[in-house]
Amino acid sequence: MNKIHNRQVICDVLMEHAKEDKDIVVLCSDSRGSASMTGFANTYPEQFVEVGIAEQDLVGISAGLAKCGKKPYAASPACFLTTRSYEQAKVDCAYSNTNVKLIGISGGISYGALGMSHHSAQDIAAMSAIPNMRVYLPSDRHQTRHLTEALLQDEKPAYIRVGRNPVEDVYTEDNCPFEMDKATVLCKGTDVLIVACGELVRPSFAAASILAKKGIKSTVMDMYCVKPLDKEGLLREAKGVKAVITVEEHSPFGGLGSMVAQVISANDPKKVINLSLPDAPVITGNSQEVFDYYGLNAEGIAKTAEEALK
Amino acid sequence: MENLKAKAYALRQDVVNMIMSGKGGHIGGDMSIMETLVTLYFNEMNISPENQHDPSRDKFVMSKGHCVEALYAVLAAKGFFPIEEVIEKFSKFGSPFIGHPNNKLPGIEMNSGSLGHGLPVAVGMAIAEKMNKSSARVYVVMGDGELAEGSVWEGAMSATHYNLDNLCAIVDRNRLQISGSTEDVMHQDSIEKRFESFGWNVLSVNGNDVDALKEAFETAKTVKGRPTLVVANTTKGLGSAVMENKASWHHHVPSAEEYEQIMKDLKEREEAALHE
Ligand SMILES: Cc1ncc(C[n+]2csc(CCOP(=O)(O)OP(=O)(O)O)c2C)c(N)n1
């Protein structure tokens, strides 16, 4: 059972680099604990900016820092970061093209029983619709490490969403294939293609084993780079399969499923089924209870795939 | 006349039981705001299950929605729903009693949880009551950390622009937020001066003293032409030394031993208040 949060990994990587790179600045909005950034704040207080409960200020200040040569990482709950500060993300980060990395923590429905105000089931749609904004949902701690390292190398805005709880590993430390903006293929099969992102990659991968026992061969893709979507990889893997299933912790509209369906329908039309959260406030529960309820677990994904092939 | 001081300590016990059952909640801020809620619901506002659909009822907005447990305890005591049901179901799978106010439940006007929304919404309500020539008053409770949100100040501006003397805002001045002292995270001093400079009538009182709160709310009603802010100076976690004035108790769930001690302390204080 993995106990290390993806958010902790982001902090670890930033701390490793902050020692040498004095331009790295972490910003929080009374969110350092939930963002696992307390270690950074205590170790590098001169590279840490606390803005209080003011997410618009958080992103605006980040953009200003970036314009003057800093490398800001603004870490705040995904729900507030992407909707409260949406205009700052659009105008001050993306439009002005400032090197701001927005770290959305406790994304999706991680906050469970705290309700819809705390869920970010529209962040992929919202952030993807902004020109010059990239959107990443890493699936486990190993991929989160590679992604954070890669993002340190560029100077453009990006949004990264991670969940609240530690998630089971998809990869291992020694075996985590990673190429920036290219999806990772976890297994290959000729019947059905399952494309997932974030925390739902792992159950999608598990669904492939359930399907294999029934003689159904599936390809599973980890599309951590929701934007820019790896279209080339998607069309390559979609070639020949009978159906495509997308799996995401997001609203049914404007997320991974919508984007995959757009690419498939324009280039290689076939059945695409989107598995997502409903277009409604989700049922009260922790992540696993909510996923189970809406069929966003290995059994549910396998069942959907099986039915799609009928 | 009901002993509201004792009631505040009795309802705190419901809050603690809710948090133990749901294994979550915001205990520190629940405890600091209890006297404000008890005074408003049992002495000040004309809100009850009987008149909940009457347009002329007073309106209440819990802007610091994370302290919903305190609100649930008070609404249950008012008869909106049974406290046993809240304690049993709080934050559990499929429950209507989630960790923030939700107006699918009776007695709750507005959904909240994202800080900084309540004041503008209350301003809208107060403007509407004026348009409707209603005598209803509007109350909104905010946290002191919450005041960092810019939207609070946009609301503060419009409240005086529209001369909203039917609006009373309360700030739970417990001087703590998640990451520590409000003064370290984003300093606030002086809230009184800031709101006064926006044109508000400001009253600063002991927010854990029911009598002081009663007097403040009565005074607020007599002030014409501008809204009133009550700065409720409180102690976060009030009720037991185990949790008082400790930032780490913002959303801490008590251990079994802590639970025993807290309940013992709360009962003692309830008793003391009864015999005061
Ligand atoms: C817009 C927004 N940002 C962040 C949060 C997360 N959050 C919940 S409670 C809290 C601290 C609130 O502090 P304060 O307003 O002082 O309330 P109190 O101390 O009375 O609990 C924060 C940051 C939130 N609910 N809404």
Image: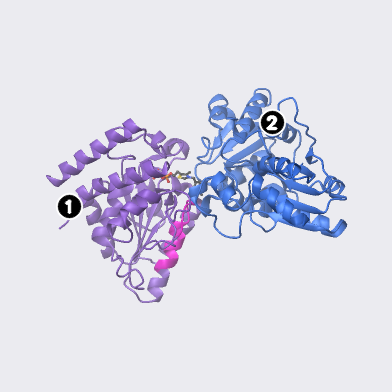
Establish whether ligand 1 lies closer than 8 Å to the Cβ of label 1: no
| Residue B107 picture location, percent across and down | 36, 62
**Magenta highlight on residue A150:** no
Q: Residue at x 38, y 66 (%)?
A: B164
Residue at the (78%, 32%) spot, across then down:
A177
Say which element carries label 2.
helix
Chain letter for blue, please.
A
Q: Position of residue B191 (x, y in %)?
A: 38, 47
The chain coloured purple is: B
- The amino acid pointed to by label 2 is His
Mark 2, Cα crowd under 10 Å, few <14 / some 14-19 / many 20+, is many
Towards the viewer: A62 or B210: B210
Of residues B223 and B147, the one drawn nearer to the viewer in this rendering: B147
Question: Is A308 placed left or right of B48 in the picture?
Answer: right
Q: Which residue is mark 2?
A: A142
Task: Quote the CA–CA distance across marks 1 and 2.
Answer: 58 Å
Residue A55: x, y in percent?
A: 55, 47
Amino acid on which disc 1 is placed: Asn
User: Visible in this render: residue A160?
Assistant: no
Q: Are marks 1 and 2 on the same chain?
A: no
B160 left or right of B263 in image: right
Please state the extent of the stretch shown in magenta in the rendering.
Answer: B111-126
Q: The C terminus of chain A appears in which quarter of the rendering?
A: bottom right
Nearest the camera: B118 or B270? B270
Question: Which quadrant of the structure image shows residue B106?
Answer: bottom left
Where the N terminus of chain A falls, by quadrant? Answer: top right
Q: What residue does disc 1 label? A: B3
The chain holding disc 2 is A
Q: Residues within 10 Å of mark 1 (few under 14, many from 20)?
A: few
- Residue B13: image location, x then y, percent: 28, 44
